[in-house]
Amino acid sequence: MNPTLNKSDFEDLTTSLKDLAYSYLEKYSPSKQQLKVYLLKKYLTKIKGTKSKKEVSSIIDEIIKNLEKNKIVNDELYSDSKARMYLRRGYSLNKINQSLRHKGIDSKYIKQSIDKIKENEIEPDFVSALKAQDETAVGLSGADGSMVRAVKRPAAIIEDDNGEMVQVDFGEVGDICSVDTTVLLKNLEASVIPVVSPLAMDDEGTILNCNADTLAAELAIALDAAKLILMSNIPGILTDVNDPTSILHYTDLQELTALEEKGAFSRGMRPKVASVRLALEGGVPRTHVIDSGREGALLEEIFTNDGCGTLVVKASDDLRAEPATAALK
């Protein structure tokens, strides 16, 4: 029969384990499983006595439960944070999934973290694909080197899909305040292709998610880019969301505004149109929206006069056909 703890032993052991837990948490941000394993190992080496492992495990579970209740230990945030870190290292979605499972993260939190990556249109396999083509590439995030600064987006009342006004808490979503291209330029000067995921940091060091198209526009402005090319799941900007053949091959901000006022754009296209506007008004001469699922779309858009997507300029006077050979210079 396993020995039981008297009240004094119980209190002493609980205090010792709490002290170990807080000491560990001051240095690291572990998952629940990592913290439990650490405390069990420390118990075996540091804490004397004849208490059973089952009794100790029960005390540890209760400590972690209270830490979780007070949001000191949070596997949901841990999953998001680790997923973003793995993403910056160039992990594929499958490898991110496996790594988080290995750390004992609940599958529902893993799914949420991966869904957030997909929602931000991040392609974690892109770095690997570039490397497979013998290109030197590096996965970065906007939080690296304080590249992108943002502020947390406040809750707002918006219209939902049913036309009803609802209050929305955007969670860990940030609005970009500033961009520092130092890290990007150093990589580009070294002939390294930087692949940037849409994360930013606020003044307190909190990591925030940003819209990928917005970040692309901000980076294009800061880098004084000649073009910004956005990819979508449709051929380009459409005048009728239900008709994929209604593509605008050439347009300007004035026509975009008119279409916007008519409600011509789908919910998914609105952020892209906003990013197109941001880039053009910020000094980027030309922006393009092309179909990511069309083979050779990028080459066709850049190296042919007709292109395959939508070319947008600030004013119609700038809508001169750009010779395909100019893109080669």
Image (spheres, rainbow, N blue to C red):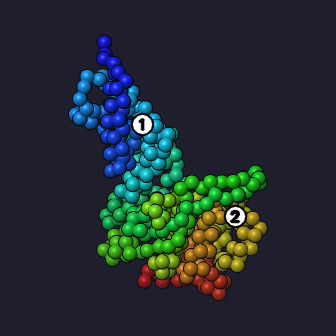
Q: Residue at x 74, y 73 (%)?
A: 258
Question: Considering only order in the chain, which callout, 1 or 2, is on the residue closer to the N terminus?
Answer: 1
Relative to 290, 190 lies left or right: left
The image quadrant where one finds the N terminus is top left
For mark 1, what is the residue? 64
Relative to 12, 314 lies left or right: right
As drawn, 284 above or below 42: below
The image quadrant where one finds the C terminus is bottom left
Q: Is residue 231 visible?
A: no
Q: Where residue 141 sits in the image (x, y, percent)? A: 42, 63
Q: Residues within 10 Å of mark 2 (few under 14, many from 20)?
A: many
As helix, strand or loop, the secondary structure at mark 1 comes to helix
Q: Is residue 154 visible?
A: yes
For mark 2, what is the residue? 265
Q: Quadrant of residue 3?
A: top left
Q: Nearer the viewer, mark 2 or mark 1?
A: 1
Q: Where residue 278 sits in the image (x, y, percent)? A: 59, 74
Tag count? 2
As drawn, 276 above or below 285: above
